[in-house]
Amino acid sequence: MSGLTVQQEPLGGDSWEGLVRLWEETDWPEGCKVEIIEGIVTVAPPPVNDHNLIAVSVQRRLYTVIPDDWEIFQTLNVAVPGRSGLYIPDLVVVPREEVPGGENYVPAAAAELVVEVTSKSNAVNDCVPKLKGYAAAGIPLYLLIDPHAKGSPTIHLYGEPSDGQYRLLHEGKFGEAVHLPEPFDLVLDTFGFPRP
């Protein structure tokens, strides 16, 4: 199954609240990843095992360096209203105090790091609109792991957001190490990442 998009007039007009209400109140297929990307609700199938193995490998390494009062989430909804977006990164690192109880999402500005591992069906979303959305929200670091890049699997680290754009901090291929700067100060070895 490949990803699909559902373009529908949000309940209550074009407002951010209407989009979120549509996202919350629609009965989506169970197990699918449902996001709002540039005002369009997208539905993607659950990721394949290699995708999950990469995410859990990064998560395991991050746990060794984050403060005790920070958390790493795999299914946290991250809101970027200025880009009409509600994303579900593969991993997001957020201070615990920034996660409001009783809510369906956190504001993107609360995140310290987001990690996306592309899937064949929706890699373009991680590489273009989400890159712009995370930068616009001011998330300090965005780690983009692309096992499906043409030629060879790649890894990109973006940081220093300014005026809605990131600076490319690292570009490499699987098998190379990437350094996540402070507050992580972590060298992430990508050699063991599964390749499609």
Image (spheres, rainbow, N blue to C red):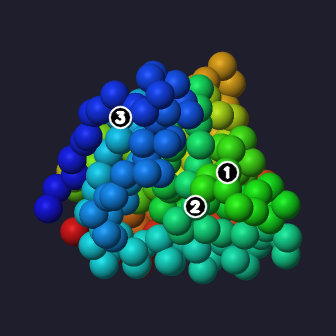
- Front residue of 59/44: it is 44
Q: Secondary structure at mark 3?
A: strand
Residue in view at x 58 percent, y 61 percent: 76
Whether residue 170 can be seen here: no
Labelled pair 2, 1 in contact (Cβ < 8 Å): yes
Say which label, 2 or 1, has the lower sequence index. 2
- Where 61 falls versus 89 (above or below)? below
x and y percentages locating residue 192 in the rendered image: 41, 78
**Numbered badge on residue 76:** 2
Residue in view at x 43 percent, y 47 percent: 23
Q: Please rate how many residues cluster around mark 1, counting C-alpha atoms within 10 Å: few if below 14, some from 14 to 19, many from 20.
A: some
Say which label, 1 or 3, has the lower sequence index. 3
Q: Secondary structure at mark 1?
A: strand
- Front residue of 145/46: it is 46
- Front residue of 123/193: it is 123
Q: CA distance from mark 1 to mark 3?
A: 19 Å
**Numbered badge on residue 40:** 3
- Where 78 falls versus 64 (above or below)? above
Please state if 118 lies on the left or on the right of 156 as rendered: left
